[in-house]
Amino acid sequence: MTQLLISVTSAKEAQIALENGADFIDLKDPAKGALGALPLATILEIVSYVKVASNSDYKLTSATIGDLPMQPQLIAEQVAQLATTGVDIIKVGFFDTGESGPSDYESCLSAMAPLAKNGLKLIAVLFAENKYPCDLISSIKNAGFYGVMLDTAIKNGATFLDYFSEQEIRHLSENVSVHNLIFGLAGSLAIQHVAKIKEFNPSYMGFRGGVCVDNLRVFELDSVKIRAIRKLL
């Protein structure tokens, strides 16, 4: 069954997400970009809260390292630092590398491979606006990653469905599945998208703006919207 990921900014929001059916508690600061990072102290507080609050029915936590350039040493250092908080999954954005191209992705994967192979669960976040090498999923798998997520870098209300055909999304989903990676879909998603996105068989769907007051990702969570999506899933 497709699981529900809710992005939160505080322990209070984590409580709202858990009480209304979230399977994943994702930690990020929506005011700081697509994958804005929260302070380490805040992440530690939320992770500790989720571990206690979910009790025997433990819910996974994930967190982002921020909107960082594709610089191997910088990214590896941020991943290692974030791991000290005890968060279960670390999300790394594969942002546009400009003219330098695929080599930057490969060098970053090489830098993170020892961390992944030492037990860290890493998810590569790809962006619908970007073009990626056709063999990138294979490289992500070879680096020991836990999963792949498709998101949007520009939060203007457009979803990945505005950039890809249904056939292209199914192909990506199948490619990720063949490599035994978990697959997440997110990016300006709201309740009206749930039925369509379920057809692509993602491991989880991620929500922030679509479950906030007035559908604005920097506003507080709306428990009614979370429960409604939970029922559809």
Image (cartoon, rainbow, N blue to C red):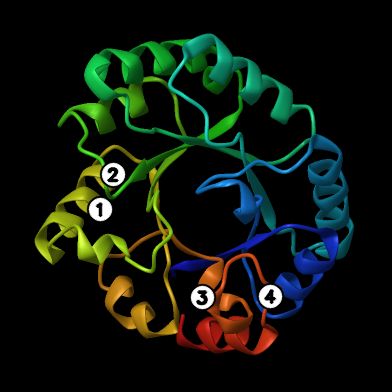
The numbered mark, 1 or 4, whose residue comes first in the sequence reads 1
Q: Mark 1 vs mark 3: give the one in front.
A: 3
In this view, the residue in front, 146 or 29, is 29
- Residue placed under numbered mark 2 in the picture: 176
Q: Identify the secondary structure beneath mark 1.
A: helix
Q: Are marks 2 and 3 in contact (CB under 8 Å)?
A: no
Label 3 sits on what residue type? Gly
- Residue placed under numbered mark 4 in the picture: 221
How many neighbours does mark 4 have within 10 angstroms: few (below 14), some (14-19), or many (20 or more)?
many
Q: Is residue 98 left or right of residue 226?
A: left
C-alpha distance separating marks 2 and 4? 30 Å
Seen at 61% across and 86% down, the residue is: 227
Which dot marks residue 144?
A: none
How many neighbours does mark 1 have within 10 angstroms: few (below 14), some (14-19), or many (20 or more)?
many
Q: Mark 2 vs mark 3: give the one in front.
A: 3
How many neighbours does mark 3 have within 10 angstroms: few (below 14), some (14-19), or many (20 or more)?
many
